[in-house]
Image: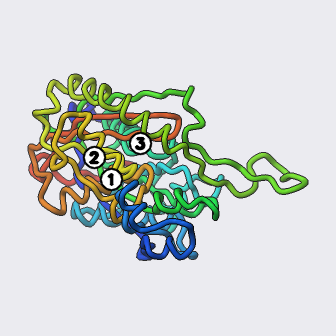
Amino acid sequence: MIDSAPESVGIRSVGRFVPDTEISNEQLVERFDTTDEWIRRKLGIHTRRVAAPDQSTSDLAVGALYDACARAGVAPDSLDLVICCTGTPDHMLPAMAAAVLRKANLLDIRGFDVNAGGCAGGVFALDVGVKYIRSGEYHRVAVVIADTVAQCLDPEDRTAHAIFGDGAACYLLEACRPGRGIGPTLMRTRPELYYTAFTERLDPPGGFPNRFSGPNYMRMDGGGVRDFALDVIPDFAEQVVKAAGTTLDEVDLIVSHQANPTLLRRLMAELGQPETKTVVVADRLGNTSGSSVVLALADAVDHGRLNPGDDVLVVSFGSGMSYGGTVVRWCGPEDFGGEPGRRG
C-alpha cells in the first residue's frame, strides 16, 4: 500500500567519507613542473585526498552511507532505497548500488545508479531521491554520491592532478513537517558545452574488443569551466532563490560545487555576497566531483554554520554542462516523524 504523498522532504543527515591518503602540493612539485605558490594562487588548493590502491568507489560510498546513518541514529537496514550517483563505478555492470548493498550486507534492500554528469550530481541525484520520498512509497532513502576521479587522470596532466580528489557523501532523506526541507529544484543542461569536461577513452594499437573497454582519462577545459561558472551560475542562482520565494541576501548560506577555492571566491563576488557566506572544503580535499557540495554541507553542520531553520542555497555544476540548484530550509530532529518501518 502506498501512503499519501508527503508535502515536504527533508535532509535528515549528511554523511561523509574521504580516503586517508593525502597528496600535498609539495608531493606534486616532486612529480611535475609546477610550484606550491602557483597551485595555491591559481587554484587555492593545498592538499587533496586520493583513494588507496585497494579502495574502490563503492568502498568510499559505503563509508559515507554508514556515516549518514550514524549521524541520524538509524540502522542501515531501515533504509527503503539506496540510490548511488557516480561517474566512476567499480564496474560498468552491475550497478554500483548493488556493490554498496553487498558490502554493507544490506541484502534485502533495493538500489540503483544514476549518472548525473559528474559534479552536477550533488543536486541532480538529490532531486531523484526527493521524488521517491514524495511518491509515498518510500519512507527513508539514502542518496550516495561517490567518485574516484583522481584514479582516471592522465599521468602527464599536472593541472588535473592538482585539482581532483576522491570522496563520497550521502544524503539521508525522509518526509518532514511542512515549511521545512527541500524547496523547488531547478536543473539545466547545456549540451553544446559537452566537451568542456569529459572522460576520453584511450585506444591502444589494434583497438579494444568493444567500445567500452580500456582506460579513460579526465579531460577538462579549465578556462571553459571558469567562464561557464562566472557567466551562467550567477543568473541561475537568482532564478533558484526566486523559485524558493527568497533572495540571495536572505539565505543564510550558499554552498556551491567545490570546483576550486579561487573560482568559489570569484563566484561569490559575482553573486554580490561575502566570502564568509559560503563553505570551502576543496582547499584540503580537492575537487571531489558530485560529492563536493554534500561534503561542504557536512562541514557546515560539523562547524555549527548550518542549523535548523537556516536557508541554504545549494548549487552544483559540472560536465555536460549540467547545473542544478535548490534552497533547503535545514531540518532538526524534531522536524521528522517517528521511526518508520522499512517497506517491503
Instruction: Locate residue 147, reporting x and y percent.
Output: 49, 57
Q: Residue furthest right?
A: 206
- Amino acid beneath label 1: Pro
- How many angstroms separate mark 1 from mark 2 (CA)? 6 Å
Using the image, determine if residue 116 lies above or below residue 276.
above
Say which element carries label 3. helix
Which quadrant would residue 104 be assigned to in this image?
bottom left
**Residue 244 visible from this viewpoint:** yes
Q: Which residue is mark 3?
A: 125
Q: Which residue is mark 1?
A: 261
- How many angstroms separate mark 3 from mark 1 (CA)? 23 Å
The quarter of the picture where the N terminus appears is top left
Q: Residue drawn at (17%, 32%), measured in percent from left and top?
A: 248
- How many angstroms separate mark 2 from mark 3 (CA)? 25 Å
Q: Residue drawn at (59%, 44%), measured in percent from left and top?
A: 198
Q: Which residue is mark 2?
A: 265
Neighbourhood count class around disc 3 (C-alpha, 10 Å): few under 14, some 14–19, many 20 upward: many
Q: Is residue 23 left or right of residue 278?
A: right
Verify CB contact (< 8 Å) between mark 3 and mark 1.
no
Verify CB contact (< 8 Å) between mark 1 and mark 2.
yes
